[in-house]
Amino acid sequence: MRPIYVIIIFLFVMTLLTLFVVKVYNSLVLLKNKIDADWQQIMLEIRYRADLTNKYLPLVTNIVSNETIENTRMVLDKLSRQMSWEDIMNSYIELERFIERIKIEVEDKNIHYAEWEKAFVENKMRLDKARDIYNDDILGMNNKVDLFPFSIIAGICGYEKYIYFRSES
């Protein structure tokens, strides 16, 4: 076999390998950007939920226990600070527990705030949908980080597994 053919075959194989690596890397970048956008949507809904809670608290101050009000305000304060993804998830779950506690205490007094109840339900539905989309994309990324040959390129480029946004239940 002539040396020129060996060189051509080698260049062809290297070109295919390079194209494959670029395609895998680009798919990882696109998925990471999608996950970041999904997270921003979740944060938008969490901030809206915190705003709803802040507006709702003065209405229930005389109805709900002071401890519940103070604990809710502490969680809202935590959510207003810069935190890691995991801390935000934990604070959100904590907020949901206090919202549920407030709801129970208000309903025990047979008082209803239909406008806020509707806003909370709609926000919760949007938040659950955003979480489902986020977790689906996390599954895709985690699969790529785990599966060969993507795992090699993900490891070289520093991609790691992401944490799922667990539900509050």
Image: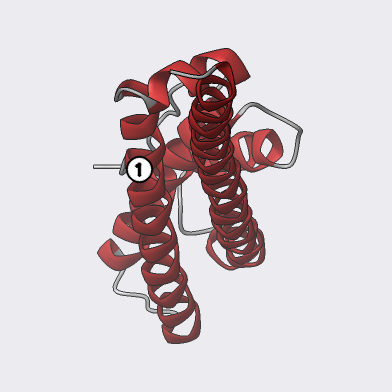
Q: Residue furthest bottom?
A: 115
Q: Residue furthest front?
A: 2
Which residue has dot 1 on it? Answer: 140
In the rendered image, the quadrant that contains the N terminus is top left
Label 1: how many residues lie within 10 Å, few (<14), some (14-19) or many (20+)? some
Residue 67 visible: no
Look at 68% across and 28% down and name the residue there.
83
Instruction: Identify which amino acid the numbered label 1 is placed on.
Output: Gly
Look at 48% across and 78% down and name the residue there.
119
User: Between 16 and 169, which is closer to the camera in this rendering?
Assistant: 16
Give residue 84's position: percent from left, percent from top: 63, 26
Q: Is residue 116 above or below residue 11?
A: below
**Quarter location, residue 124:** bottom left
In the shown orientation, is residue 134 left or right of residue 22?
Answer: left
Residue 151 visible: yes
**Quarter location, residue 152:** top left
What colour scheme does the image use?
A: secondary structure
In the rendered image, the quadrant that contains the C terminus is top left
Numbered disc 1: secondary structure: helix
Look at 42% across and 77% down and name the residue there.
122
Give residue 154's position: percent from left, percent from top: 50, 23
User: Between 145 and 35, which is closer to the camera in this rendering?
Assistant: 145
In the shown orientation, is residue 46 left or right of residue 13?
Answer: right
Give residue 77's position: percent from left, percent from top: 70, 38
User: Between 158 and 137, which is closer to the camera in this rendering?
Assistant: 158
Look at 29% across and 25% down and name the residue there.
147
Q: How many marks?
A: 1
Give residue 142's position: percent from left, percent from top: 36, 31
Q: Is residue 64 above or below residue 19?
A: below
